[in-house]
Amino acid sequence: MTDIIPQRIVAIVGRPNVGKSALFNRLAKRRLSIVHEESGVTRDRVACEVQWDGEHFELIDTGGIHLMDGATATDRIHAGIHDQVDTAVEDAAVLLLVVDIEAGLLPLDQEVARQLRESGRPVLIAANKADHPGRDDRSMEFDPLGFPVFPVSALHDRGMEALMTEVIDLLPPATPAEKIDALKVAVVGRPNVGKSSFINRLLRHDRVIVSPQPGTTRDSIEIPFTLGKGPQARRYRLIDTAGMRRKGKVHDPVERFSLMRAEKSIQHADVVVHMLDAEQGPTAQDKTIASMILARHKGAVLMINKWDLAKDATQRQYTKALRHALPFLDFVPIIYVSAHSGLNIRKSIETIDYVASQIRIECTTGLLNRVLRDAFNRTQPHAVAGRRLKLYYATQTGIQPVRIRLFVNHPRHVSRNYEAYLMKSLRAAFGLEGAPLVLQYRAHR
């Protein structure tokens, strides 16, 4: 996919509950922002690249502006929402002010329009919920705001063509950049382990809202990130996810949607960073999250955050205890960081890069067969029904995950313990740290 210069950005803004996220999803042609009747569901900026009639640009959804002029936010989450909106407005080339055609022009709409007017950016008004032509005339109520008004319906896909034709005309020319696939890195974990703080520390600015209140992050936020310049630049797409609680404890529909998005982020990632709280250690829910990562065959990194607060153990002692608690992750590298102090933040990227290289390893066929034959010769599998498993040949059939196909005499005779032994032998020979390994068995004929 061709990268687009940052100036080709369209930001969706407005007061709460006017349908900003519904419009975002309609233009993105997929459900990225959580849509719910509850006010204030969107908090962080949610961004994605959009193509419309062959034109590419970045689309940003923002949280609802709910303060009148001179008012101040009463908590960190509301203050963070307004900071996120201000940043989106500052970065954007075109602003889409979304209003509710059913509710009509409200004082808060006028206040938002005033703030946008001060930005100096082109502003278009999307008069949402014009679900049928009979409502289109009501859009004239917003003419006093002084911006072009377009009656639209995000729910029924009405009026989008006229609106987007004007948006495209206002965007600066696109400058194609070198095509480089970004590494998709999802950061997952229980609530309040420091996922958003880690990403903000990595980016060196407050890209996502951080609050002591659990559940602050709701959407899965994708953030482009580049290290270096020119041909040597490394490109990433960081994915901040909502805290994952046990499904039995999730009753709120918004949190349920957030959990689904986090699970989907794991599915789409190349490498998953599983973050734990150093003071709390691994919990039953951490085992569930880890199992989810393994089941989807994703590259994995165990990140122990808040290490500056852990006073009772050394890293060696902690690692030993962690390996004992999570024995099925014995091949996953562990890194100790502090999002607060910056400890090992740079090293964490190096660890992620290393795992990314491991999930793409291609094993030479000759060495692969030699390693497996040596493993069979060292430890013979137990006979089943009087028959012993024999290996004839092996070959690698894929990467991400690394897939090895083994041609044997009786595929059903492979026990789980013996497969674990073969995997351990392969990892000892090829590394594969943090990389999922899938063995497939075929009958040799």
Image (cartoon, grey):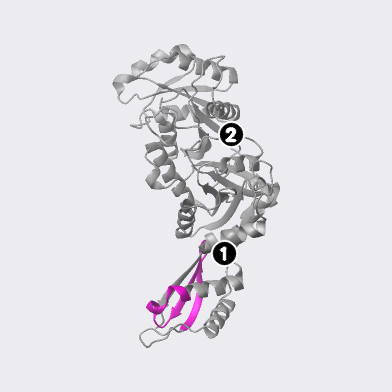
Q: Residue at x 66, y 56 (%)?
A: 315
Q: Position of residue 416 (x, y in %)?
A: 44, 73
Q: Nearer the viewer, residue 30 or 427?
A: 427
Circle 1: element type: loop
The amino acid pointed to by label 1 is Phe
Q: Position of residue 76 (x, y in %)?
A: 56, 28
Q: Is residue 266 magenta?
A: no
Mark nearer the viewer, 1 or 2: 1
User: Which residue is at the far front?
Assistant: 312
Q: Position of residue 141 (x, y in %)?
A: 39, 13
Q: Nearer the viewer, residue 67 or 126?
A: 67
Q: From what the image shows, is residue 10 above or below residue 283? A: above
The amino acid pointed to by label 2 is Pro
According to the picture, the residue beneath numbered tag 1 turns out to be: 331
Q: From what the image shows, is residue 408 above or below residue 295? A: below
The C terminus appears in which quarter of the rendering? bottom left
Q: Mark 2, residues whose alpha carbon is within 10 Å: few (<14), some, or many (≥20)?
A: few
Q: Which mark is residue 173?
A: 2
- Tell me where residue 154 sits by quadrant: top left
Is residue 332 visible in the rendered image? The answer is: no
Q: Residue at x 41, y 26 (%)?
A: 17
Residue stretch in magenta: 391-418
Q: Mark 1, residues whose alpha carbon is within 10 Å: few (<14), some, or many (≥20)?
A: some
Q: Are marks 1 and 2 in contact (CB under 8 Å)?
A: no
Q: Is residue 396 magenta?
A: yes
Q: Position of residue 331 (x, y in %)?
A: 57, 64
Is residue 322 visible in the rendered image? The answer is: yes
Q: CA distance from mark 1 to mark 2?
A: 48 Å
Q: Nearer the viewer, residue 370 or 256?
A: 256
Q: From what the image shows, is residue 178 above or below residue 84? A: below
